[in-house]
Amino acid sequence: MKGTMSTDVKTIIQEGAELTDRALETLIPSVDTVPASIHGAMRHSTFAGGKRLRPVLAMQAAVTIAGVIPSGIEHLGAALEMLHTYSLIHDDLPALDNDDLRRGKPTCHKAFGEAIAILAGDALQTRAFEVLASLNAPSAAVVQIIGLIANAVGTVEGMIGGQVLDIESEHRKPTPELVDAIHRAKTGALIRVSVVTGGIFSGATHDDVARLDTFGRKAGLAFQIADDVLDMTQDSSHLGKTAGKDLATEKVTWPAVFGIEQSRRDAAALIEEAFAALAPYGSRADGLKSVARYLVERRN
Amino acid sequence: MKGTMSTDVKTIIQEGAELTDRALETLIPSVDTVPASIHGAMRHSTFAGGKRLRPVLAMQAAVTIAGVIPSGIEHLGAALEMLHTYSLIHDDLPALDNDDLRRGKPTCHKAFGEAIAILAGDALQTRAFEVLASLNAPSAAVVQIIGLIANAVGTVEGMIGGQVLDIESEHRKPTPELVDAIHRAKTGALIRVSVVTGGIFSGATHDDVARLDTFGRKAGLAFQIADDVLDMTQDSSHLGKTAGKDLATEKVTWPAVFGIEQSRRDAAALIEEAFAALAPYGSRADGLKSVARYLVERRN
């Protein structure tokens, strides 16, 4: 399969990541801007080696709709990445997961103290919405994008809701329903909305949005399952974080409920279902599909 | 003066607060909505006896521009109140001010634990932007309102920036420049943007926005000075929080730098300057002016 792709998936990801990084560099105040400590903390976590997968998915969804990566979409990508980074900073805090390392580097509160880490997470969320409000798109599309993204990081089937379910379900027996609900909310919703808003930025119709939503929902779940499998099968040096931590803290994960082999089959089947939703776009969807396949296979 | 007001200021405030409370009641998910704990925590702090001053200021700014309280502005007011509440929840956390009581009730982390309090603050910020994205106003106005509010709660001259300056300046010698910068950012920016966005919601022109901005900036600083004076002159039972706490923790305040008498004169002078900006609106600004005067005099 990989030999037939028109553009190398690693090039797609790398170029999308570079576009996003340049936008983040201009959109987050420099450490020379008062008050310096908060901007240092925001930058510490934002530039800690993230792969910019959400921005890349938004860009390739745009290509699926419009055939090109539209000018200015890197600001949407930067906002999505700020929201992802804010969630990681708060998730790592002592009161939550209490992690000292993230991608092999000190977590925000380890480097800057707890007060500044809390405020840096807060500020990344705020700045994300400020950047979205200045997107170079028609006002009606901007309002729609902001509403959808806020919903995806909120409490009802969104990212914060997933974090709360995750906290509440530790040390409880995992059920298929619970693990599905946590995955859909905690990481799935932001992946899904990245794909959908990338399309809306490029002028997606109502039908386009429905197809991208189906793709984003199924692919997002596949990524999370692949991540959970990776956590159980790789060692810490490959992960850049403590391996087996999910198991040690009795986190509810897909392989904990369904086993590793079934999880791998589920992830592969979900990706095929996700691809089916993109059939009307023919080869314009190749970039989006290749990125999704790479994310699942790399992790398996 | 008070006898000549067309509408009693306490009625204005009470009616605005009730309108806001009803909106908040519908806009924050109920405790029956999964996950329950986060919605309980969001409600605990949102319905803890706040006076809804920011929504009331937004509504009276709207009256100043349009002559009436426009339908749907209570959703703008609710969003402003969610942002204010989120900042209080995070400010009270052990890593920040470490307060057990707020308005005589347990703070969010005391009632729900630190993890849920952090996430409840996060979620109130998110929900505020989601509510703003569904405001009943033209898309261009909604985008402008979201951009201005995000800026006012951000790190550069906004609310979070003020909190960081405040943390960094504890136990340092206060200077007039520092106390002015903290006040403008920490509490002033959200007051100011409440007035401005209330006007924009009602169709304010560019000139209207400039006048409301001047009013909001000067009145907001006057409120904060009056608050600081109150902290130094009242006892704890009147305040509903620990009196003299600013002094005990060596917080940088206006009376600490300028003395109580000078602070009272400064607050009164700022209110007169704020009123001057509203001269073109004649009696339509009476409600906004009476609320502002009430807030400063009540506290002095």
Image (cartoon, coloured by chain):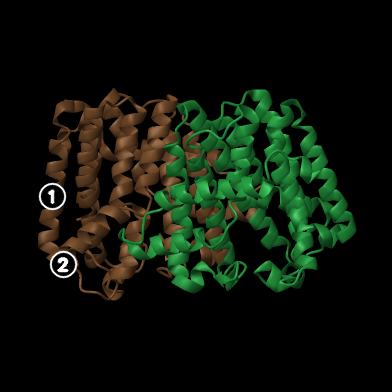
Chain colours: A brown, B green
Q: What residue type is labelled 1?
A: Ala
Element type where label 2 sits in the image = helix
Q: Name the residue under label 2.
A: A257
Residue B188 image position (x, y, % from top left): 68, 47
Q: Mark 2 lies on which chain?
A: A
Is B15 left or right of B280, judged from the image as shown? left
Judging depth in this view, the residue of A97 and A31 nearest the camera is A97
Judging depth in this view, the residue of A167 and B30 nearest the camera is B30
Q: Quadrant of residue A192?
A: top left
Element type where label 1 sits in the image = helix
Residue at 55% of width from left, 66% of height from top?
Answer: A114
Q: In this view, does A60 lie above or below B49?
A: above
Name the N-terminal-most of marks 1 and 2.
2
Residue A258 image position (x, y, % from top left): 13, 65
Q: Which amino acid does label 2 sit on?
A: Val
Q: Mark 1 points at which residue?
A: A268
Residue A173 image position (x, y, % from top left): 20, 73
Quarter in which the C terminus of chain B is drawn: bottom right
Query: Is residue B158 among what the camera can see?
Result: no
Q: In which quarter of the image is residue A149?
A: top left
